[in-house]
Amino acid sequence: MAKTALVTGAGSGIGRAAALALHKAGFKVALCGRREEALKETDAEGGGGMAVLPCDVTDPAAVEALYGKIESDLGRLDVVFNNAGTNVPATSFGDLTPEQWLKVIGVNLNGAFLCAHGAFKLMQRQSPQGGRIINNGSISAHVPRPGSAPYTASKHAITGLTRSISLDGRPFNIACGQIDIGNAASHMTAAMSAGVPQADGTMKPEPVMDVAHVADAVVSMAGLPLEANVQFMTIMATNMPFIGRG
């Protein structure tokens, strides 16, 4: 029987690439995102057959309804790629507004919690029990870029969330791992060819990698038996200024 996977933020970028790769690998894929039209485009690009489930991941009631629909329509959930995220323009810490902070934390941390929590509860009660949660961290889960306090704080928090879920999931056969991604070509990295702020105050272009490599890594993590887990994976453009950053 084909495994079922949910991908959040599936309307573009890494989420779209991962959803298409999981679909190609034989998973039954559910697509989650705020924009129904973008999810339909992902489904069409994969040749159809994926479940299009619009949802605002920051809305607890909407996320609860999402998992109710997955349970009723698809029967079970084997994998969730907890990928939805957002950012604000690079802003020095003193110039940040509360609204900017709350926007990023609302999606990147609160939304990630709600989606992981809903998946955990479904995986607890389904039979056979268990499943896998893959959280999208970031290079920013390790070190910041200049002017990135909300994003960096959210991604550092994802690491703690991943570790807690991994530990609490053991009695229920729920595995949880994290993929930390650096400079995968998407709408969020489009500006990197023109230059991004560096720790020394300069602006420099940075190398990027094809998002397909990230999608392949997600498929590899998702395909493991539950007795094995990739706890943390870092995948990045080989020459990006991460090792030795600063």
Image (cartoon, rainbow, N blue to C red):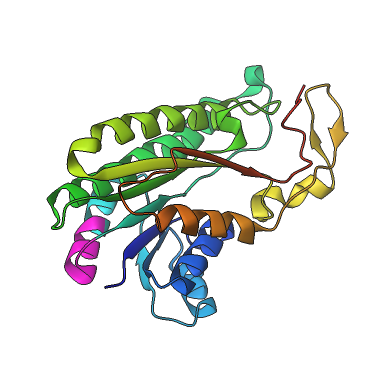
User: In front: 143, or 32?
Assistant: 143
Q: Residue furthest bottom?
A: 47
User: Looking at the figure, which quarter contains the C terminus?
Assistant: top right
Q: Is residue 39 left or right of residue 75?
A: right
Q: Over which residues does the magenta segment extend?
A: 67-76
Q: Is residue 133 above or below residue 38?
A: above
Q: Main secondary structure of the magenta part?
A: helix
Q: Is residue 219 above or below residue 101?
A: below
User: Can you see residue 173?
Assistant: yes
Q: Position of residue 75 (x, y in %)?
A: 19, 67
Q: Position of residue 145 (x, y in %)?
A: 69, 29
Residue 158 appears in which quarter of the rendering?
A: top left
User: In front: 136, or 67?
Assistant: 136
Q: Position of residue 67 (x, y in %)?
A: 24, 56
Q: Position of residue 170 (x, y in %)?
A: 24, 37
- Please check the rendered image and state whether residue 75 is part of the magenta-colored stretch, yes or no: yes
Q: Measuring 64% from the left and 20% from the top, which residue is drawn there?
A: 93
User: Looking at the figure, which quarter contains the N terminus?
Assistant: bottom left
Q: Is residue 177 above or below residue 131?
A: above
Residue 144 appears in which quarter of the rendering?
A: top right
Q: Measuring 69% from the left and 58% from the top, which residue is drawn there?
A: 210
Residue 197 appears in which quarter of the rendering?
A: top right
- Please check the rendered image and state whether residue 41 is part of the magenta-colored stretch, yes or no: no
Q: Measuring 41% from the left and 47% from the top, which residue is drawn there?
A: 134
Q: Is residue 167 left or right of residue 244?
A: left
Q: Measuring 83% from the left and 23% from the top, which residue is drawn there?
A: 201
The number of numbered badges drawn on the structure is: 0
